[in-house]
Amino acid sequence: MNGSRLPRRLLLTGAGSAAVAALTACQTARTSLPTPQPTRAATSGTPDQAALRRKIASLLVVGFRGDRVKSSDWIVRAIRDGLGGVILFDRDLETGAARNVRSPQQVTTLVRELKKAAPGRLIVSIDQEGGRTARLNPSNGFPATRSEAEIGAENSPAATREWARGLVESLTRVGVNLNYAPVVDLNIDPASRAIGALDRSFSADPDVVVSNATEEIHAHRAAGVKTSLKHFPGIGSAAGNTDFEVVDVSATWRPIELEPYRRLIRAGLADSVLAAHVLNKQLDPNRPASLSPKVITDLLRGELGWQGPVVSDDMQAVAITRQYGSAEAVHLALQAGVDLLVFANQQVYEPDIFEETLNVVVGLVESGKLSQARIDQSVARVDTLRPKR
């Protein structure tokens, strides 16, 4: 990890940036998927390619710089061209300056302008876990929030409900409709630079994690905000963080880390599942979880029965780009079963990332390396994350 410079999911609040072995089969309820809706044609290319481009665009979430936008900005043009969603940050990793959030009124106006540019229902996403990992925080005019570790230590349903409602009130106040939370990693290693040391886990006990995550999810659903269980298949023992390095949990990961996912999926409490970039050779000896069909298709969708949307961690993370490069990583993620690809634009800042990724995936489909049916499947899944209005 690079000193005080922490990554997409570990940027601190306040001052700014500061961060199977044998599996038993289980009976799980499988989510039925909606029929993909017709997509609007883009303004360039043949009608078929224009429709394909709009479908693929809807599967991308991108970060951007700026606390206000104008019609000529690249992010607004991307949204008009069908970009599926945006992700908001309080601080910019490279510059250390404020990024998208300065005050409640300002970010509310920003989100309103972004949604106004969208031809459909724009996903506006954020990492609002509580504690130090909260983009809406006292430094930009929002209430302080307790960490998952504090909530799990108290382990009171009433206290958890009150805490979760506070998180959600900040989200709905500004128009966020997808929160990359709750963290359901078990606190396997309290010194983990990814989880334990940042107080991002409710507990090492799956019962405590599931109980508190359940209350948090209910609070989000009551307000119409979608959630994402993370970081599958579990990074509670990770010594490093994947935004800056390759992280291998093969020797420390335990099958019990699947239990929160198994139980929350079975209970119908998953809106989406976020796939981690960690290498876990117990599950796949060659590829990180986010790029692995063995982890996403066979384990998560097959063994655990999850048929809804799978979200990537930051596709610009060093753990991925150092070995695979952007184009190959996108191909492998979609092949593995990931549906929504997130580009935080924090590790590097690439205003062309939307157009470049769009072109890569169109090329994969046109060359036969990905099928249109596979794209349609992801469109249907991601559509379940979109706001109703």
Image (spheres, rainbow, N blue to C red):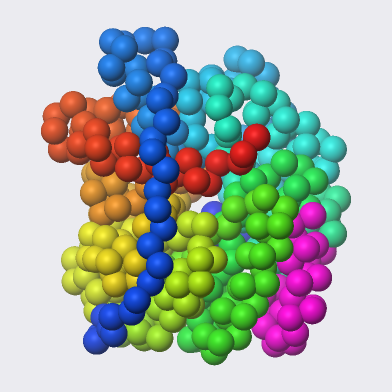
| Residue drawn 49% across the image and 30% down it | 83
* Rendered view: 310 above or below 301: above
Residue 363 vs 283, above or below: the answer is above
In this view of the protein, which residue sits in the foreground, 347 or 213?
213
In-image side of 283 versus 207 (left or right): left
Is residue 194 or residue 17 the one in the foreground? Answer: 194
Whether the magenta-drawn stretch holds residue 118 is answered as: no
Residue pictured at 13% horizontal, 33% vertical: 368
Q: Is residue 322 above or below residue 370?
A: below
Is 301 on the left or on the right of 111, as rendered?
A: left
Q: Residue at x 76, y 72 (%)?
A: 161
Q: Quadrant of the C terminus?
A: top right
* 33 horizontally vs 303: left or right: right
Q: Residue 227 occupies which quadrant of the picture?
A: bottom right
Residue 204 % position (x, y): 54, 88
The x, y position of residue 291, in whole percent, is: 28, 56
* Residue 199 visible in the snapshot: no
The magenta-colored residue range is 144-169
| Relative horizontal placement of residue 285, taking residue 376 as reference (left or right) | left
Residue 115 percent location from the top left of the image: 65, 29
Q: Position of residue 61 (x, y in %)?
A: 49, 40
Asked whether 270 or 197 is in front, the reply is 270
**Residue drawn 24% across the image and 66% down it:** 298
Query: Was residue 149 drawn as part of the magenta stretch in this picture?
Result: yes
